[in-house]
Image (cartoon, rainbow, N blue to C red):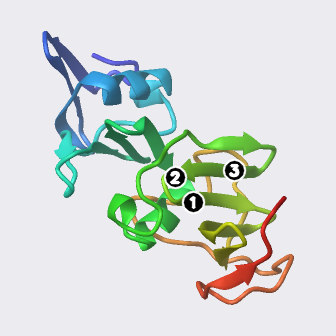
Amino acid sequence: MLSDGISRRQEFQGGHIYWSPATGAHSIQGLIYDKWKALGAETGVLKFPASDEIVAPDGKGRFTTFQGGAIYWSPATGAHPVYGPLYLFWAHFGYKAGSFGYPTGDPVYTGDNVSQQFQRGTLRLWDGYLEGIRPVDDSEAITYAIPTPIPSTPSSSISAATGSLPTRTAPRRRTTDLVPRQLAPTL
């Protein structure tokens, strides 16, 4: 029995099975399990597993979904969580098979702002906007942006289960909803 007094965990030689009333029983193992444990396991931002480990469509990577996001692993990138508004934004662009590829780092928080590196760009919630920045070449990048509230904590403001993106009533700057815009390179 786990700390909630209801859910269960069973350890095996090759992995672990976690059960909760909301998610049912799911196995979790290896580097995805290690990352999940480092993030607080079922009491952390991701909560309980909502799937067993799944082989990614490219046949190389693996992922496990959780109540609050997912952890993706590939031989080239390692295991990294994606959750909250960045997870929904990344999903919109096709997850690992889309514009940004696999995550290459964990989310990095600076106050109310968060960014995360992916194989082909960066996603960030910065100054009230979700942005996806993909380099085109050495001289330019494409940025996709949508307004959204800034979360007060890594696990707040968004429901990964429902896939809802809240809207901001007073945006801090103007942008076009999910339309690419050319930016000058940052030096």
Specify the label residue 114 is tagged with: 3
Q: Mark 2 falls on what kind of element?
A: strand
Residue farthest toward the left in the current orientation of the protein: 13
Mark 1 Cα-neighbour bin, 10 Å: few <14, some 14–19, many ≥20: many
Specify the label residue 121 is tagged with: 1
Specify the label residue 118 is tagged with: 2
Where residue 137 appears, as percent x and y from the top left, is 62, 70
Disc 2 residue type (three-letter): Phe
| Dot in front, 2 or 3 | 2
Where residue 93 appears, as percent x and y from the top left, is 44, 72
Q: Mark 1 falls on what kind of element?
A: strand
Q: Mark 3 falls on what kind of element?
A: strand
Q: Check the picture and name the quadrant holding the N terminus.
A: top left
Residue farthest toward the front in the current orientation of the protein: 138
Residue shown at 36%/58% (left/top)? Answer: 96
Disc 1 residue type (three-letter): Gly
